[in-house]
Amino acid sequence: VDKSGIVSYKKKPTSELMAAIQLGIGQSVGGLSSKPERDVLMQDFGVVEVVFFPGEGSNLTPAHHYSDFRFKTYAPVAFRYFRDLFGIQPDDFMLSLCDEPLKELSNPGASGSIFYLTQDDEFIIKTVQHKEAEFLQKLLPGYFLNISQNKRTLLPKFYGLYCYQCSGKNIRFTVMNNLLPSTVKLHEKYDMKGSTYKRKASKHERSKSSPTLKDLDFMDNHPEGLQLEKDTYDALIKTLQRDCRVLESFKIMDYSLLVGIYNLDLANKEKQQQQIQLQQDKEQSENYGSSQSRSDRTDTRNSLHRGKSFKTRIGQYSTPMESIQGVTDLNEEIDEDTDVPSDIQTPHWLSNSHVSDCPGGIPARNAKGERLLIYLGIIDILQSFRLKKRLEHTMKSIVIDGDTISVHRPSYYAQRFLQYHATRVFKKTPTALKHSPSKKR
Ligand code: ATP
Ligand code: CA
Ligand code: CA
């Protein structure tokens, strides 16, 4: 951010970057429609398509009033197949990404990546480093193999990899699934790795209206963890286990589980308070004709409920609940190994109308017994152990006790990540707490 308040990335104003991204993706996805659908072949993963966007326009590209640029699409046919796999139609993809302005998110990460969110909440764009883009390219065949075998996953869904090229600069970015609803205000948000070393949100982060907290903050706020019904717990942990196995096989580490918590009981209280406040405001303004206090409250009101729901989602397997249990009303068989029931029994309170604000969250309770909906997924998986991490690891292990370092061997990392989430974060509801009679099999 410069003196005049203009946000830049690699010295490019982000407004220009955003516009170029929208032009580029529009052309790229639109251009694909002329290519017949076919099976993905190995060589498709290595393809890079380059299109030049001169300001005055060309027979392929529209005119624009930014600097001339080049737009690269990596593995277009492979990604088209991938989007199709998740039920994302080309038209929907284009509409979401290109038709309305993107929203820029403030990134709590240290890497300096920029994040954009589409208006409909569906997709996130993240700028990635050269090494990360390269790694994703190499990862693609194996990653596709895993995802097509198992759609029940919390791994990030990559829908595209692109590069914007202008005056010698390269800005690479991926399009991924957005994990957190922005239409309802989540009460808490955690980025957790299962490590304790430096895993506390900074003062600056905590002062934000919707901070992203870390492992130590979670253990402070939820020493007893989050309670899940047995079937839900089993499905979630099993999904995490499979995902970690995949990540480990690629020697990936340093990823996080992003967990958003929506507290229904708190939300209801907030709504009631709001109504009381509104009533008081009304009486006050009737008595004094003052509108002062009313405008003071607009803020709180907006931050609570904007009335729109997180989703009529366009893709499949896109809500957390679908990600761990699969979609049962599709024609296909989800999973052969059946130690996890594909139809998880949901608690009766989930059918209440006020849950319709944010469907698809995983039902849970906190230690106070309050009803929660949880949104989650694994993020930031483009760090491979073999890149530079080895050095970092050796250096840190001299200084700090090996067990608490957040950068460690991939298998150890996966193990600790799983252990932490399966024992500290998520817990099986003790039978005494159960509200519905136990299920007969
Ligand atoms: P660093 O490498 O410093 O950890 P980064 O720039 O690589 O950071 P990420 O770790 O990928 O960024 O993400 C940073 C934050 O952005 C997350 O903690 C989360 O709040 C948000 N975020 C990332 N990916 C998603 C997503 N798919 N959906 C919703 N929010 C996301
Ligand atoms: Ca991260
Ligand atoms: Ca990162």
Image (cartoon, rainbow, N blue to C red):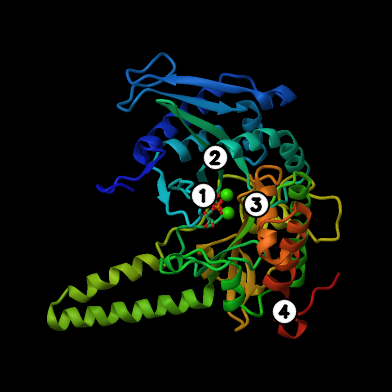
Look at the numbered discs 1 and 2 and tell me whether their residues touch, using CB distance below 8 Å: yes
Q: What's the distance in space between the residues labelled 1 and 2, CA to CA?
A: 9 Å
Q: Is ligand 1 less than 8 Å from the beta carbon at label 1?
A: yes
From the top left corner, tell me how far across and down residue 166 is, in percent.
41, 27
Measure how far apart labels 4 and 3 are at the Cα level: 50 Å
Q: Amino acid at mark 3?
A: Glu
Give the percent coordinates (x, y) of residue 346.
69, 68
Mark 4 within 8 Å of ligand 1, using the beta carbon: no
Q: Which residue bears the numbered disc 2?
A: 129
Q: Quadrant of residue 256?
A: bottom right
Residue to which mark 4 is pinned: 436
Q: Position of residue 10 (x, y in %)?
A: 41, 38
What is the C-alpha distance between the residues marked 2 and 3?
18 Å
Tag nearer the camera, 4 or 3: 3
Q: Secondary structure at mark 3?
A: helix
Identify the amino acid type marked 2.
Answer: Gln
User: Which residue is at a point 59% across and 76% down the rendered structure image?
Assistant: 371
Position of 224 with respect to 276 (left or right) is right
Looking at the rendered structure, the kind of residue marked 4 is Ser
